[in-house]
Image (spheres, coloured by chain):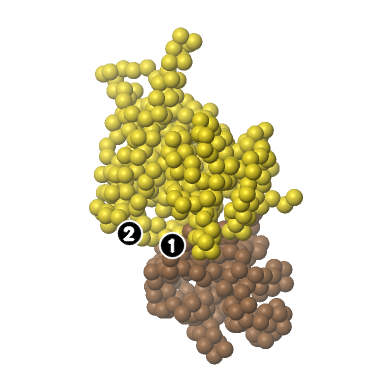
Amino acid sequence: MIEIRWHGRGGQGAKTVSQILAQILMREGKHVQAFPEYGPERSGAPVKAYDRISDEEIRIHSGVYNPDIVAVIDETLLESENPTDGLKPDGVLIVNTPRSADEIRRKTGFQGKIIAFNATKVAQEAGTGFPNVPMLGAVVAVLGVDPQVAEEELKETLSHRLPPEVVEKNLKAFRAGYEAAKEVYVGS
Amino acid sequence: MQKTVVGYRKAMTGHKAVAEAMRQIEPDVVAVYPITPQSEIAEYYAEYVHNGVVRTELVPVESEHSAMSACVGAAAAGARVMTATASQGLALMVEVVYIAAGLRLPIVMALANRSLSAPINIHCDHSDAYLARDSGAIQIFAESAQEAYDYMIIAQKLAEDKRVRLPVLVNLDGFTLTHTLQVVELLPDEAVKGFVGEFEPIHPLLDVDNPSTWGAFAMPDYYFELKRAQQAGMEAAPEAFLEVQKAFSELSGRAYRGFFEAYRLEDAERAIVVMGSTAGTAKVVVDELRERGEKVGLLKVWLWRPFVREELVKLLGHLEAVAVLDRALSFGNMGALFLDVTSAFVHEDKRPVFVNYIYGLGGRDVTTDQIKRVYEELKGARPSHELRYLGLRE
């Protein structure tokens, strides 16, 4: 079983990408869970969301305490939260940041794999402005999921709520996040 | 297991799974109070109505009390009726739930289990279900979104069984199941419609050629007999439950058998009794401890009201020690489920040692470590009146 924790701020779409990721993995034939941590909901407040992915039926219903992957959508949460808490030593930390992986390593003290890339910039270049989708691309790359399967699911889900041209921009943002992470992840 | 229809799998929340079951059943009337602590169930259903996916009359009312009152009126008129609520919503409804049961109205309700105030909290425990324990409604607990979906369909047929004719509450843990995306296998729409069939009301108010009186006055000369007749509906429920459950299992291929799910109990020495999603977490612990050679098992309650004592004795009688986990306090006494389980053994000479734990109040996370602690403490457990607390900071 693989467990993932997303850190974001209210309104950044951490819950949304955790759910889309679960749907992608379901397409791949996996059993999945996706759930947010609920507190008083307000825009800008720290938010956590989780995924569980398994080849077998998932029966556990407790919280996630020792994730394999942590994805930090908002870099300022490195100050206020403690995103590496419980992260497995051989796990992967993915951070949306203009800084280098080495800087993130010094900052967090995390010894496992770190993927640092500027998801905000990627999202801006793609024309969406939301870093959650490039971060989803990065997690998909780390999980080794077929990006085409992921794109099909993303397209289908987003098409329910967004016009076609915005969906296209999101697909571009996803692909850019995927490529950025893949390059670093395979290279590390 | 052999199944007669092919379902399709989708990732969805417990809320959505319940709403999908309701869409497929397509009741005549759904009455809901659309403000927190309502659930997304009502939101999804309103969308189906708005989009013309269902022909249900959706009645948005001004309170939960009115929601259940509208359900009672519609059901007495002869309609198939469903609703959904949670927490304080049920608390306000409960006066009328008693009336629905007393009038023998087969209203099916999803209850997203959440704590009761005070203090204000929005998270999971079973205090809302416990509040309605003696209302006369049948109560079923689901472990997963899949079970919530399946039992909504089973509940409809059970409620409408002419031997039973009672409201049914399908409990699913708030947030843990309602807000968690999980894989659910849905049956085809026509299979669900065929399974629940047409609703045949008894003496409907709208049958103006055969007028009937509903909600009549009954003084000391008749009230007692009418309540005894209501109990007969409850007494008929176990047999009807098994029949509907079996028919559903044959349709879906999902093996639901019995009032309780016995998990690795046959040769077990120690076991936990629990309701709802915690059963899933406990199964993970049972498997882990079994790997280490520990003889542990689990009994999950599907049908809480009526509580089938004879079956419980058969399943637990051989054990050395049993922990009963209650997700609500019954202030001033042991937990309600504990009292159910232990009272079933009152005539038995041979019985396990029973221990009672209160756990998970107000959404306190229930971890595998907590469950492991229970199994550990059951080793050499002695009879005691102590009420224990799991996961509490003391």
- Front-most of A12 and B285? B285
- Badge 2 element: strand
- Front-most of B27 and B333? B333
Kindly identify which residue carries mark 2.
B8
- Badge 1 element: loop
Does residue A66 appear to the left or right of B158 in the view shown? right
Kindly identify which residue carries mark 1.
A57
Q: CA distance from mark 1 to mark 2?
A: 16 Å
The disc at residue B110 is: none
Q: Which quarter of the picture shows residue B119?
A: top right
Q: Residue at x 66, y 39 (%)?
A: B384
Q: For mark 1, does the 10 Å Cα neighbourhood hold few (<14), some (14 to 19), or many (20 or more) residues?
A: few
- Front-most of A151 and B119? B119
**Percent coordinates x, y for residue B358 in the rendering:** 63, 44
Residue A103 higher or lower than B343, as above or below: below
Residue A155 higher or lower than B47, as above or below: below
Residue A50 higher or lower than B344, as above or below: below
Count of numbered tags = 2
Q: Which quarter of the picture shows residue B26?
A: top left
Amino acid type, residue under disc 1 in the picture: Glu
The chain identifier of the residue carrying mark 1 reads: A
Chain A drawing hue: brown
Work out whether residue B260 can be spotted: yes
Q: Which quarter of the picture shows residue A74?
A: bottom right
Looking at the figure, which quarter contains the C terminus of chain A? bottom right
Image chain in yellow: B
**Percent coordinates x, y for residue B325 in the rendering:** 58, 45
Q: For mark 2, does the 10 Å Cα neighbourhood hold few (<14), some (14 to 19), or many (20 or more) residues?
A: few
**Percent coordinates x, y for residue B72 in the rendering:** 43, 29
